[in-house]
Image: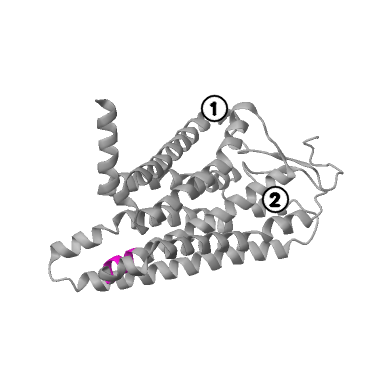
Amino acid sequence: MSDSNASDFTNPSTFILQGIPSLERFYVWISIPFFVMYAIAILGNFTILFIVKREPSLHVPMYYFLCMMAVTDLVLSTSILPKMLSIFWFNSREIDFSACLTQMFFIHCFTAIGSGIFVAMAFDRYVAICHPLRHSTILTNPVVAKVGLTVVLRGSILTLPQPFLARQWPYCRTNIIPHSYCEHITLVKLACADIRISSYYGLSVAVLVTSLDIFFIALSYALILRAIFSLPTQEARLKTFGTCGSHLCVILASYSSALFSFLTQRFGRNVPLHFHILTANMYLLVPPTLNPIIYGVRTKQIRGRLLQLVTHRGI
């Protein structure tokens, strides 16, 4: 299919991902940090899953939620990186329309799921610190499973209308997507129709999910801080707050990159297109890369088990 912007087709079966416009000559160099981040994300998150599975003492709600986050990070990074690297290395830019919609669904669905898991982890920290004697009775395995299922269903149900709406629009202008992956609003902007329903729905879901999740996380930590400040000694306060350190670092890494990408997309009209695309990619790649590193460094149980495995293998 021709790459021409003056195409006369309607609803093409194949789209062309443009990659990162104006940076084509640097693709080989750009691919190196992306590949390294992907490799770290894959290795790190699989290591988290392996350690939690092998260590019975980690079979508690906090680490169950961490495993859910690891799976979410694996799906998110794998949804975009293989295709992006094929563009950088092999100029393989074609993507089937159905595959494009599937990629779009997984990106937005698992972004919402990841945000929901942050709320679940914040609730776990709240119960552990504010109601420590009731933690095992409140967050039982069936409750953790129901929370995880609710988070997955919420992300799936809220995201599902986006690809269905996108499929309905007629695409008769061009089949070239000026992006490195099938981002929702970038795709529907190619339609020769009134796309306000898609635009408003996508923005509403993003704002609603993010604002509600941040509110519940902030509420949990406000209650946590109140409980911490009521402790009698400075040492006890620092030790208790230290149990939240990994979670807070991961939240800051995820939401700060998401906020930066959102503000750049919405208000950076004079920012070059390639910068928009790079920030959108980093928003999806940085958290899956950093999360296992943060938990591996800051969580004593995981760090100790990992060192034990490495030492044993070395011997």
The relative height of residue 313 versus residue 219 in the rendered view (above or below) is above
Split into 4 quadrants, where in the image is the C terminus?
Answer: top left
The stretch of residues the image draws in magenta is 125-130
Q: Nearer the viewer, residue 278 or 248?
A: 248
Q: Give left or right: position of 305 versus 70.
A: left
Q: Give left or right: position of 92 versus 144.
A: right
Q: Main secondary structure of the magenta part?
A: helix
Q: Real-space Cα distance between discs 2 and 1?
A: 26 Å
Split into 4 quadrants, where in the image is the N terminus?
Answer: top right
User: What's under tag 2, amino acid-wise?
Assistant: Leu
The numbered mark at residue 193 is none
Q: Position of residue 142 (x, y in %)?
A: 44, 63
Q: Position of residue 113 (x, y in %)?
A: 52, 57
User: Which residue is depicted at the point 64% across and 50% down?
Assistant: 104
Check if mark 2's residue and mark 1's residue have beta carbons within 8 Å: no
User: What's under tag 1, amino acid-wise?
Assistant: Val
Note whether residue 270 is visible. Answer: no
Q: Residues within 10 Å of mark 2 (few under 14, many from 20)?
A: many
Q: Give left or right: position of 281 versus 58.
A: right
Q: Is residue 257 magenta?
A: no
The residue identified by callout 2 is 187
User: Farthest residue toward the right?
Assistant: 8
Q: Secondary structure at mark 1?
A: helix
The residue identified by callout 1 is 28
Q: Position of residue 108 (x, y in %)?
A: 58, 54
User: Which residue is depicted at the point 56% across and 49% down?
Assistant: 271
